[in-house]
Amino acid sequence: MEQNLKKPPNPSKGLLQSDELYQYILETSVFPREPEPLKELREVTATHPRAMMATAPDAGQLITMLLSLVNAKKTIEIGVFTGYSLLLTALSIPQDGKNCYDTDTMLVQIVAIDISRESYEIGLPIIRKSGVEHKIDFNESEALPILDQLLEDSQNTASFDFAFVDADKVGGIVVYDNTLWGGTVAMPEELVPDYMQQGRELTIKLNKSLASDPRVQISHAPLGDGITICRRLY
């Protein structure tokens, strides 16, 4: 008997209408300006069985611009994986951070948090070769305990200029990655692969929460797997 069931769509990292159009953007605007260390890390990450977890290079290009626009000096990143977005942040921010009250005091500039160090170790040799490891404080932990520790120190209040994924802070910019979850947020639930169901549900809840939060200005950019840029208003 002929089957009329629709084939489930294939979730894609690039969400443009065609792979050719996405590749055009990468080859004309992204790859020509991608620093060599990022290219090397991207190629290494491509061999990882969970390579889809990495920040898409076109999204990374926008993050680099945002870091420059806000003149970011101190950032926080939750969810590191092999470190593509971490490396691009370390390459983008100034070489050294100075405490405005004590110009002789060097500050770690990027607080990085991930529940596993294993994937980070893949990118670490490239980060070291790039000469930016000194900017990074990597924490193998769930995010909330580290965030709570940061908030206990009053010097951290309003001190972060940029956060990738999430952070409790005042001012600056927070960027959430994977906010289109492979395009599944717009799929009928019955067509979503089982392994993406939970993430889809959580992503939809996050997107609704951000859209209804009057404290932030948002822009949902269809780059890579979707990134949502939030600027706190008050």
Image: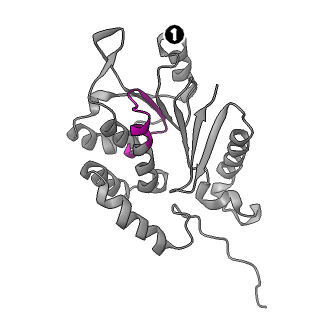
Q: Position of residue 94 (x, y in %)?
A: 30, 31
- Image quarter of the N terminus: bottom right
Above or below, 60 against 216 in this view is: below
Residue position marked by numbered label 1 in the rendering: 154
Residue at 55% from the left image edge and 26% from the top image edge: 171
Looking at this view, is 45 or 156 the one in front?
156
For label 1, the crowd category at 10 Å Cα-Cα, with few meaning under 14, some 14 to 19 and many 20 or more, is few
User: Does dot 1 land on a helix, a strand or a loop?
Assistant: helix
Looking at this view, is 44 or 96 the one in front?
96
**105 sits to left or right of 225:** left
Residue at 48% from the left image edge and 56% from the top image edge: 52
- Image quarter of the C terminus: top right
Q: Position of residue 9 (x, y in %)?
A: 64, 70
**43 sits to left or right of 131:** right
Look at the image and say whether residue 71 sits in the magenta stretch: yes
Mark 1 is on which residue type?
Ser
**168 sits to left or right of 83:** right
Residue at 63% from the left image edge and 42% from the top image edge: 218
Q: Position of residue 2 (x, y in %)?
A: 76, 90
Looking at this view, is 152 or 106 the one in front?
106
Above or below, 12 against 227 in this view is: below
Residue 81 at least partly seen:
no
- Circle count: 1
Residue at 52% from the left image edge and 16% from the top image edge: 157
Look at the image and say whether residue 175 sits in the magenta stretch: no
Residue 84 at least partly seen:
yes
Q: How is the image coloured?
A: one colour
When asked about the image quadrant of residue 109, the answer is top left
Q: Position of residue 5 (x, y in %)?
A: 75, 79
| Region in magenta | 66-84
**194 sits to left or right of 78:** right
